[in-house]
Image (cartoon, rainbow, N blue to C red):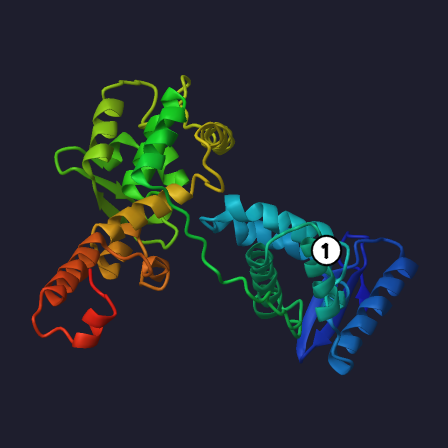
Amino acid sequence: MPLSRRGKSKVWQMSFHVNGKQVRRSTGTMDKRVAERIYAKLKTRLAEEEWFDFDEGKKRTFEELAEKYEQQVGKEQKSWISARSYFMQLKEFFGAYTLSKITPALIDDFKQLRKAKGVKPATINRQLNILKRMLNLARKRWQWLKEVPVIEMELNADKKRVRHLSFDEFHRLLDSCDDWLKDLVSLAAWTGLRQGNVLHLKRAQVNLSARTITIEGDTMKNGEPLIIPLAEPAYEVLVNALQVVRIDSSYVFCNSDGKPFYNVVVRRAFNRATEKAKLKDFRYHDLRHCYASWTRQAGVDLDTLADLLGHKDTRMTRRYAHITPAHLRGAVELLEASYSNSSTKPAHFKEKGISN
C-alpha cells in the first residue's frame, strides 16, 4: 500500500520506489484525503522527472540562487566586500526571474540598463563574470540548470588604467592631507600595498630590524604571502607610527577606539585632499600605480616588479612596460652623443643640419 500508518502515529506515511530503491516519507498530515493528494502530486512529479526530464530551472528563482551563492561562496571570497555591490545589483535586476527565464536577451537588457546609467564596460564585465560564476555553479554544483545561457562580455573593456603622480605632485598631495591621513598615503605609495592591507596592517607584520612588511596569503588577492622590503620613506612612517603605543589595539593605524579606519572615511578624506591639491582623476588605489611606476622608472625589470607587487606572473605588470626607466634613457643619450661626435657621420646628416 502506498499509504499507511504505523504504530500509534496517526500521520500517514508514503512508501514508493525510485530507481529500484524503496523510499518512505511522511505526508505530515493525519487527513487521509490530503495525504492521498500529496502522494498523487509527488508521484506525478517523479514521473515528469523521469519521462519529461523535469527542469529545476523552471521553479528556482535567481533570488534563491543569490542567497545560496552568498552564503556558500561569496562570503568565502577575499574580494567579497568590494564585489558585493555588483552582486546586489544583479540580484535586484534578475531576482524575480526563474533561472530558465535568464536568457541572452534578458542579460543584454541588464547590460543596456547599466550602460544607460553611465557604467563603464570594465565594470559591467566584472558583474557579468559574477553572473557567469553563479549560473555555472547552479548547473554544475547544485544542478538547478541544464545549460548556462551565452553571456557576451563588453568589448573595449580591457584598457588598463594607469594613473600615477610625479614626485612634485605627490608632495603636493601629502601637504593637502589631514595629519592622520598622511601616513596612510605615504605607506601606500612607497610599498604598493592595497588599501585594505594598509588599513589592517598589524604591528606583528612589521619587522623594523629587517626593514620588511609581511602580508599573509589569506589577505592577499592572489592568495600568496608577500614580503615587502621597506624604502626609506615607508620605513620612517612605520618607525614613527609604532612609537605610539595603543594597548588596546594590534593595528599600526587606528582610531581612538583601537579599530582600523573605515574605508569610506579614508576615501572621503582622500578625495578632499586630491581636490585641495588640484589633482584630477586620482584615486587611492592609484597610489599603488605610483609605487609601480616610480620603481619601473628607477630601472627595475618587470619580473622583479611583479614580485614586489605580488603578481603571480607579469601579465598584470605589463601595464607598466611602456614606462621607460631613467637609466635606459640615459644610455640612449650616451649613444646619441657618441654618434654625434663620430667622424664617420654620413654627409647628408650634416647637410640637413641634423645633430644633437
| Dot 1 alpha-carbon crowd within 10 angstroms: few under 14, some 14 to 19, many 20 or more | few
Nearer to the camera, 176 or 142: 176
Check disc 1 and report the residue beneath it.
Answer: 113
Q: Is residue 57 left or right of residue 305?
A: right
Q: Quadrant of residue 249?
A: top left
Q: Residue furthest right?
A: 33
Q: Quadrant of residue 24?
A: bottom right
Q: Position of residue 79 (x, y in %)?
A: 47, 49
- Indicate the quadrant containing the C terminus: top left, top right, bottom left or bottom right: bottom left
| Vertical side of 87 occupied by 319: above or below | below
Q: Residue furthest left?
A: 343
Secondary structure beneath disc 1?
helix
Q: Position of residue 287 (x, y in %)?
A: 37, 41
The three-letter amino acid code for the residue at tag 1 is Leu
Determine the residue positioned at 47% across, 51% down. Answer: 77
Q: How many marks?
A: 1
Determine the residue positioned at 27% across, 24% down. Answer: 241
Q: Position of residue 326 (x, y in %)?
A: 21, 53
Nearer to the camera, 122 or 226: 122
Determine the residue positioned at 31% across, 56% down. Answer: 323
Determine the residue positioned at 30% across, 51% down. Answer: 309
- Indicate the quadrant containing the N terminus: top left, top right, bottom left or bottom right: bottom right
Q: Is residue 235 left or right of residue 248?
A: left
| Vertical side of 188 occupied by 331: above or below | below
Q: Is any part of residue 200 visible from this angle?
A: no
Q: Is any part of residue 226 visible from this angle?
A: yes
| Vertical side of 163 occupied by 154: above or below | below
Q: Is residue 128 left or right of residue 248?
A: right
Nearer to the camera, 17 or 269: 269
